[in-house]
Image: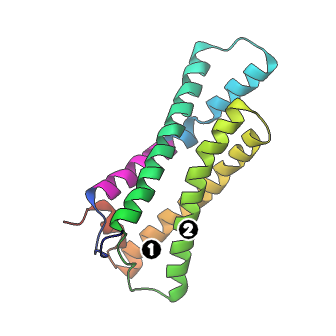
Amino acid sequence: MASPLRSGYSVSQVALHWAVALLVLFQLVFGDSMSQFLDLRHRGTTIDASVRSWADYHYWVGLTILALILLRLLLRLARSVPEPAETGPGWMKKAAAASHALFYVILLAMPVLGLLGYYIGDPYADIHSWGKPLLIILICIHAAAALLHHFWLKDGTLRRMLVPAR
């Protein structure tokens, strides 16, 4: 059962947020190595050790993201999350809730689709690759909203994800 709502996120929630953010950034920057690896494998060509290594990193970082997102969901159920800030119009809270839910869906689906694409191939690999632009758009919206809260609404929303509650 979830604990009562707090004014901020726990140390573990903040740490998981930033760990996932860094790992997702890694995947977005270096993820094309997996496409190159799969293309070479499909053609039956020799795969360079460097390409194989970067593909392995992509594989294992993806599994790590999946595990951390599952842990985040468990923490969310066990510890709850802080109430949203009372600033801004009502639609903003709905948009925030929808974007957070979409983050969880994408961050759970991408590793699963990646695994299916790796072991089975298309259409899973294609669907997995479509997630990249969606994820980039969602990250940009998320970052813009955090900055809006911090600099315009000045409601402490960003600070709650930077400094854990005591």
Q: Is residue 129 left or right of residue 85?
A: right
How far apart are the two marked residues, 2 and 1, measured between alpha carbons?
A: 15 Å
**Which residue does the numbered mark 1 point to in the structure image?**
148
Query: Which residue is pictured at 55% across the width and 60% down the height?
Result: 103
Classify mark 1: residues with Cα within 10 Å, few (<14), some (14-19) or many (20+).
some
- Which secondary structure class fits the magenta region best? helix
Q: Position of residue 27 (x, y in %)?
A: 54, 40
Indicate the secondary structure of the residue bearing disc 1: helix
Q: Position of residue 43 (x, y in %)?
A: 81, 19
Is 24 one of the magenta-colored residues? Answer: yes
Classify mark 2: residues with Cα within 10 Å, few (<14), some (14-19) or many (20+).
some
**The N terminus sits in image quarter:** bottom left
Indicate the secondary structure of the residue bearing disc 2: helix
Q: Position of residue 109 (x, y in %)?
A: 62, 50
Confirm or deny contact between disc 2 and disc 1 (CB under 8 A): no
Q: Nearer the viewer, residue 90 or 147?
A: 90
Kindly report which numbered mark, 2 or 1, lies closer to the viewer in this rendering: 2
Q: Position of residue 38 (x, y in %)?
A: 71, 26
Looking at numbered disc 1 in the image, what kind of residue is underneath it? Leu
Q: Which mark is residue 124?
A: none
Q: Nearer the viewer, residue 105 or 46?
A: 105
Relative to residue 71, is residue 49 depicted above or below? above
Query: Which residue is pictured at 74% across the width and 33% down the height?
Result: 120
Q: Is residue 125 left or right of residue 63?
A: right
- Which badge, 2 or 1, comes first in the chain's sequence? 2
**Which residue does the numbered mark 2 point to in the structure image?**
99
Looking at numbered disc 2 in the image, what kind of residue is underneath it? Ser
In the image, farthest residue toward the bottom:
89
Residues in magenta, as a range = 12-25
Q: How many marks?
A: 2
In the image, farthest residue toward the left:
166
